[in-house]
Amino acid sequence: MSQPIPDYLVGRIRYLSTPLEPIPTDVAPKLDPLPGIRAVLFDVYGTLVISASGDIGLAGERPRERNTTGAFAAALDAAGIRAPATAGPEQLEPAIRTSHAQRRAASIEFPEVDILAIWSEVLGGKVSASRDKLAQLAVEYECRVNPVWPMPGLARLLADLRRRLLVLGIVSNAQFYTPLMLEGFLGAPLADLGFDAECCAWSYRLLEAKPATRIYQVALAGLDRVHGIAPGEVLYVGNDLRNDIWPASLTGCRTALFAGDARSLRLREDDPRCAGVVPDRVVIDLSQITDAILPAD
């Protein structure tokens, strides 16, 4: 999105969020030191933040107990939007599927949507809603149906990596509210937290999602252009063997599987694309990234 998003949405995300705790897994960590790393790229949902659905809401499976009808009504009310009686949350996923099908027909294997365009379509084009109101609707609804919360140790991890002068970036299936969520939880813009915007790639901007390697190549191009860092000097951290470890490995990155929350851990044992895909390291707590994998020089 080229235009700025209202600052008040950061506050709304904080207000609508309540603490969550990760659910432990039985995966054993693999924590040998990994030398030669100059940059760390992160997945977001299920890695940096706990997600009730295990992923970004529109991509993951929403918990069955979530009252999407009630969430939709509350989101409309908060955003001050009067929707036609025919509009409802049940139209959201069909609209996403239709958009995906159109982009696949244009040879995009792993398409992404612009959630504001989707919400406009759900409202039937009959509602006079400004871009800012649509943005608030998207935030209000997502926070209600897919609660998220920072993974334990996130702030400390980022502080440790900054002290070690590592370049930080993000490669994430995301929407416009994802960076706002991180800012709200951590109390500072991403740049102040150490993330280089030139080394961050968001699926909603590219309209292409992981596991496509193109989204990784955007961040890697920034690392090369701005910092002279090659893929073999990059550690990518994510919770999904197909969406994170497999494509990151294909681009030449070193990889760490985050296996700290059973909601989001995706081992993809039935996916033939992941056969033989082995992460370089496995962590079950964010602190292990700096305490064991990236020890200070």
Image (cartoon, helix red, strand yellow):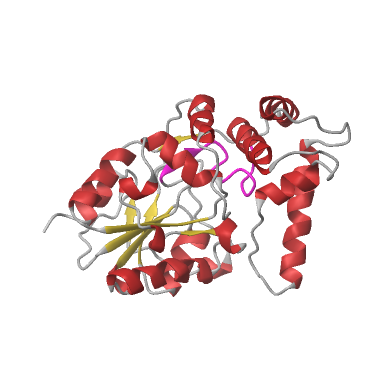
Q: Nearer the viewer, residue 48 or 184?
A: 184
Q: Quadrant of the N terminus?
A: bottom right
100 left or right of 233? right
116 left or right of 190? right
Q: Determine whether 125 is above or below 233 in the image.
A: above
The outermost residue toward the right is 86
Image location of residue 118, percent across then percent down = 73, 49
- Check if residue 49 falls in the magenta segment: yes
Q: Determine whether 208 is above or below 93 in the image.
A: below
**On the image, which quarter does residue 119 sit in?**
top right
**On the image, which quarter does residue 109 sit in?**
bottom right
Image location of residue 151, percent across then percent down = 39, 38
Residue at the (24%, 65%) spot, across then down: 37
Give the magenta-colored segment's residue range. Answer: 48-62
Image location of residue 268, percent across then percent down = 54, 58
Q: Nearer the viewer, residue 172 or 256?
A: 172
Residue at the (41%, 70%) spot, across then down: 249
127 left or right of 267? right
Q: Nearer the viewer, residue 36 or 178?
A: 178
Task: Decide whether the magenta segment is chiefly helix, strand or loop.
Answer: loop
Residue 106 visible in the shown view: yes
Residue 262 visible in the shown view: no
Q: Determine whether 69 is above or below 44 in the image.
A: above
**On the image, which quarter does residue 57 sit in?**
top right
The outermost residue toward the left is 297
Image location of residue 50, percent across then percent down = 46, 38
- Check if residue 286 falls in the magenta segment: no
